[in-house]
Image (spheres, helix red, strand yellow):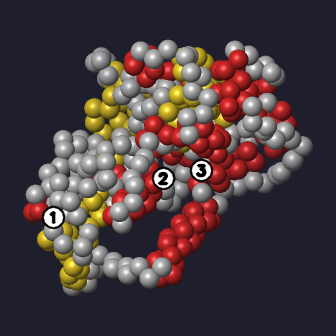
Amino acid sequence: ALLNNSHLYHLAHGKDFANRGIEITGIRLNLEKMMEQKSGAVKALTGGIAHLFKQNKVVHVSGFGKITGKNQVTATKEDGSTQVINTKNILIATGSEVAPFPGITIDEDNIVSSTGALSLKKVPEKMVVIGAGVIGVELGSVWQRLGADVTAVEFMGHVGGMGIDMEISKNFQRILQKQGLKFKLNTKVTGATKKPDGKIDVAVEAAAGGKAEVITCDVLLVCIGRRPFTKNLGLEDIGIELDKRGRIPVNNRFQTKIPNVYAIGDVVAGPMLAHKAEDEGILCVEGMAGGAVHIDYNCVPSVIYTHPEVAWVGKSEEQLKEEGIEYKIGKFPFAANSRAKTNADTDGMVKILSQKSTDRMLGAHILGAGAGEMVNEAALAMEYGASCEDVARVCHAHPTVSEAFREANLAASFGKAINF
């Protein structure tokens, strides 16, 4: 909600609307109202889950659950009372929590996590974001659009986190910088000090070591990732040991070493994505009932919900090189797409990677408006082993931005797009 609404505010407040012949005066931000709309959307979504529980006769017990036996869970409720639940199977789906930054205490006031950054009472004049991964660039872009001077400090040499294709990352960074976001890459944060006036001095230096620098800000946002929520669940009491990253080891049916205790989502290996967890949950329960369990993690898409969006599925060019796989590349810029031109939203491109010997799609990387919707076509193609020619021969409606996806597949398969 905040990503979408901050984008609309940015369009209206800047020159974009005026360039389209829409002249508006007296635009102002009502942050309280924007937060109300966000909270209303969240309430409606969570309320929908409660309704589905009731509709499907699922008993919902609110409390902190702990495994107190191989067939038993004890829930401690808010009032301190407990409820013991005896069961045939146990499924652990406790998700993840914000990973802390050593030496920096998050107070959710002006040193905030991603949770606190969603509920700030006013737009900070200056914000520093530790981490330019998915969450860092998403939240950084929200507050930059709303008027903050935002600097993201990233230990690695690129933006967008793990898995992103480097060519896409470089273009993405260029676009975000054009919008006003600032980046300090290959840079580490060595400490943060809150001053008497409430401002924060953030000490940084080159990741390889070097001269220290201090950046003063009103809000410090810590976005260095998340960690599995696996503490105090009673796992050790029944013999389940965690791996070095605090995750629960499972087999390909999501069973732990205790066959009737299962785990899915952020508490097991793999990307911490809601849709990945959803698929695992469905497959896990089907497996409990004796059904087949199959998931191809190479076909799970990732999306960064900035504007423009970034989305990808499958291998990056760097991964293919590392694995020694011979590949072909097909690209198509949105600047050559008719719908993107008419929308005056032409930043970005589609990049397709295919196996040289078979033409099978190995990866799709999209930077542009609507990338998160378009990437699902790539995931479908990869799940069923489609070639780039297969995709290129499917008629795509005109004018749509998805024609760029078809054109990139044409380029990968035949060496040349039609309209570029």
Dot 2 falls on a residue whose secondary structure is: helix
- Measuring 23% from the left and 62% from the top, which residue is drawn there? 261
Amino acid type of disc 3? Leu
Between marks 1 and 2, how big is the CA–CA gap? Answer: 27 Å
Number of dots carrying numbers: 3
Dot 3 falls on a residue whose secondary structure is: helix
Q: Are marks 3 and 2 in contact (CB under 8 Å)?
A: no
Task: Tell me which label, 3 or 2, sits earlier in the chain.
Answer: 3
Residue 55 disc label: none
Between marks 3 and 1, how big is the CA–CA gap? Answer: 38 Å
Q: Is residue 327 left or right of residue 163?
A: right
- Measuring 84% from the left and 39% from the top, which residue is drawn there? 398
Q: Mark 3 — residue?
A: 3
- Measuring 35% from the left and 51% from the top, which residue is drawn there? 266
Please say if 240 is above or below 378.
below
Considering depth in this image, is 414 or 217 the residue closer to the camera? 414
Measured as percent of width and height from the top left, residue 90 is found at 26, 67
Q: Mark 2 — residue?
A: 275
- Measuring 26% from the left and 84% from the top, which residue is drawn there? 79
Amino acid type of disc 1? Gly
Task: Tell me which label, 1 or 2, sits earlier in the chain.
Answer: 1
Amino acid type of disc 2? His
